[in-house]
Image: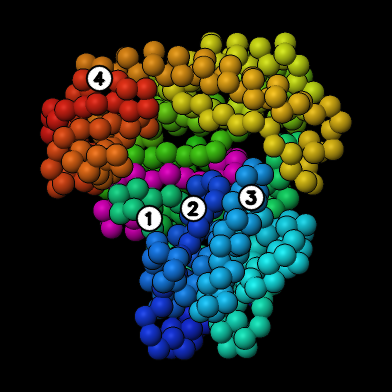
Amino acid sequence: MKTENEVKIQQEYMEKVKHMNDKSLKYTIVTMGCQLNENDSEKLCGMLEKMGYSKTQNQQEADLALFNTCCVRENAEDKLFGKLGELKRLKEQKGIIIAIGGCMMQEKHITNKIKESYPFVDILFGTHTLHKFPEDLYKVLQEKRKREDIIDIDGKIYEGLPIKRNSNKKASVTIMNGCNNFCSYCIVPYVRGRERSRQPRDIINEVKELAMQGYQEITLLGQNVNSYLKVERQKGIPFEEYEGIHSFATLLQAINKIDGIQRIRFVSPHPKDFTEDVIEAIAKCNKVCKLVHLPLQSGNTKVLKEMNRKYTKEHYLALVEKMKATIPNLTLSTDIIVGFPGETEEEFQDTLDVVKKVKFEQVYMFIYSRRVGTPGDKMENQVPEEIKHKRFNQLKTLVESQIEENNQKYVGTIQKVLVEGESKNNPNLLSGRTDSNKVVIFEGSKDLIGKIIELKIISQHMWYLKGEKDGKTK
């Protein structure tokens, strides 16, 4: 069945559910994991609201509880099972519908545990069947029986699903799904499937629509975002070239021309796919933020090989130097895993060495977590937990010392800041982010929210900068 026909069928199910519900129904949603999961949740929320549900933060008043899961880290499983335990009473009292989707549902041992230990769950759906959620919900309501809608084959890309975005200033746009890298620590290729790119026309139309709605910043999403259309070109899979787009670099250039959009970000790229044309596009496109996320994972070549990362320490550092020489005002963020199987103290020191040399603006640090079904889980030389935590703390100390040093260079400068809303810790202050993704807190009127303004940075405070209004709004 063509994807547009499937979407039309699901739209009909949305109408059926809406007509079945003769009162105002409410839902809660818990999203775990990455920005791709957040984007999927926005689509789920869009479908639910088309079906007559409204969102609530109060689980006690919800008629439907939805979980969009992640399986990258072990604590996500613990969080899900804890939440399900809390919902058992609500299920008994008011018959709340419980639905679980996302990456974790592609793992057979997890779905088996849910069916055995939490038999009151109504709907299980996977990453490839998200678009069918209206049909699954309708059949649960109509037939009063549980639904399991999970497939192992690679899903298709479905255009035209409704979406309820979390912000009216910043939006994420998925440009591709799946991953072909098979890093030995990562479960994502097994639960998200192989790489498949959206058609250029669909991406451009979505971004243009966002610009018309007043969005200022977009983030392009993909598991390996800078390999956009690479598989299609290599395998001769048809795609419609639109506005000259045939690669990630040309996609950036095309989006850069769209009026209304002021900032373009992207996550997550892979170092092996940072080709010359991508680096040049970042340098020349004035709207593309010069904070680039460049995942390291480990600074040791042997560990990188065991991780199946396809680059060396030397290659990574050379790439950093090339990017710094080409892209003005470049800043870098990264991901690092501590305690991968077999990592020695000497090999861990290589990671610290790279961090010292690069001086990342932001570092997302993770203690290695075994994932069932990955090669890393089967490796015999697992690093003891106490050593993992010791190394994590060493890395954390180094990173925090560098953050303080990096922050100091902002003091006294004028920065363009997208004002996102009230500060989480002080509603009397506003909060926004610089091009380099630094949080800035400042005094200002609420009518500045959603605008890009110039602020003078007057002090730094480790996790945020303090600014004062100094300049024109945009």
Which of the two marks, 4 or 2, is nearer to us in this view? 4
- Label ID, residue 459: 4
- Cβ–Cβ below 8 Å for labels 2 and 1? yes
- Label ID, residue 26: none
CA gap between label 4 and label 3 equals 39 Å
The residue sitting at the right extreme is 380
The residue to which callout 3 is attached is: 78
Label 2 secondary element? helix
**Foreground pick, 60 / 130:** 60
Residue drawn at (60%, 11%), measured in percent from left and top?
Answer: 353
- Cβ–Cβ below 8 Å for labels 3 and 1? no
The amino acid type of the residue labelled 4 equals Ser
The residue to which callout 2 is attached is: 38
Quadrant assignment for the C terminus: top left
CA gap between label 3 and label 2 equals 19 Å
Q: In this view, does 24 lie to the left or right of 383?
A: left
Q: Is residue 312 left or right of residue 59?
A: right
Total tally of numbered discs in the picture: 4
Asked if one can make out residue 391 in the rendered structure from this viewpoint, the answer is: yes
Which contiguous range is marked in magenta? 209-231
Q: Say whether residue 228 is magenta.
A: yes
The amino acid type of the residue labelled 1 equals Asn
Residue drawn at (84%, 38%), measured in percent from left and top?
Answer: 378
Residue 286 position, x and y percent, is: 33, 32
Label 4 secondary element? strand
